[in-house]
Image (cartoon, grey):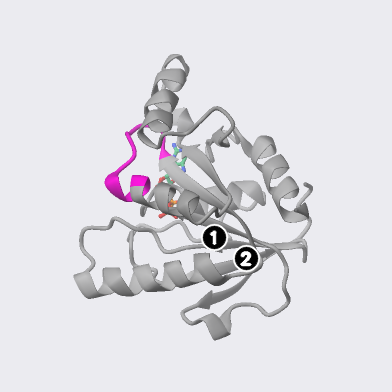
Amino acid sequence: MKVTDAQFVISAVRPDQYPQDALPEIALAGRSNVGKSSLINRMINRKNLARTSSTPGKTQHLNYYLINDQLYFVDLPGYGFAKVSKSQREAWGRMIENYLLNRETLKLVLLMIDLRHPPSKDDELMYDWLKHYEIPVCVVATKADKVPKSKWAKHSKIIREALALNSSDPFILFSSEIGMGKDELWSMISAAIQS
Ligand code: GDP
């Protein structure tokens, strides 16, 4: 997909603030700092439309980005940040769960996992939960440029096994730094929004 226009639309805290135009949505989930903002910026060829956060976990909002008047990227709040309180975590859970289960325009969730590390318990729970509810999900292994190429296969296998992916479950190696995986991910998104 050739991105000709991308804009930040809203940082939504309540469902009544979500866009009403029924365009397809691609949600990004993953722990804080995994590289969600960087991925959005790379996908749309912008340096800084999505804010890359130095304060992980701070945003408790759903950030909507409109691409080509055609689809939305929805940046979900990052999970697994130790410093949030239990009540904040619960509020986060309710909001995300509600969004993921009830948003009819949601076409695909990108579950983002840092290629350098095995998935966390939260990553595993999130993946199992999405599969259980049959929500389409693509695992995106981020920061591939930080792992030597000779170790990509090994690190990918660790992630795939921890999440119990089978060979047909989508998995993309990605690097915002060098643009790796961008075309493959756009193909996946294009297919998802046409379904
Ligand atoms: P978010 O909290 O998930 O939105 O994560 P950010 O996009 O803010 O990224 C967190 C940190 O990781 C920032 O310092 C980014 O520059 C860095 N980062 C994100 N993606 C990549 C990548 O593909 N390669 C490298 N080397 N660094 C990355």
The Cα atoms of the two marked residues, 2 and 1, are separated by: 8 Å
**Left-right relation of 56 to 17:** left
Residue 37: percent from the left, percent from the top?
A: 50, 54
Of 83 and 5, which appears nearest the observer?
A: 83
Disc ID at residue 65: 2
For residue 116: magenta? yes
Q: Are marks 2 and 1 in contact (CB under 8 Å)?
A: yes
In this rendering, would 68 be left or right of 162?
right
Q: Quadrant of residue 65?
A: bottom right
When the figure is inspected, residue 18 is found, relative to residue 68, above or below; the finding is below
Q: Amino acid at mark 1?
A: Ala
Q: Which mark is residue 99?
A: none
Residue 190 left/right relative to 112:
right
- Packing grade of label 1 (10 A; few <14, some 14-19, many >=20) is many
* Range drawn in magenta: 114-124
The response on whether ligand 1 sits within 8 Å of label 1 is yes
Which residue is outermost to the top?
150
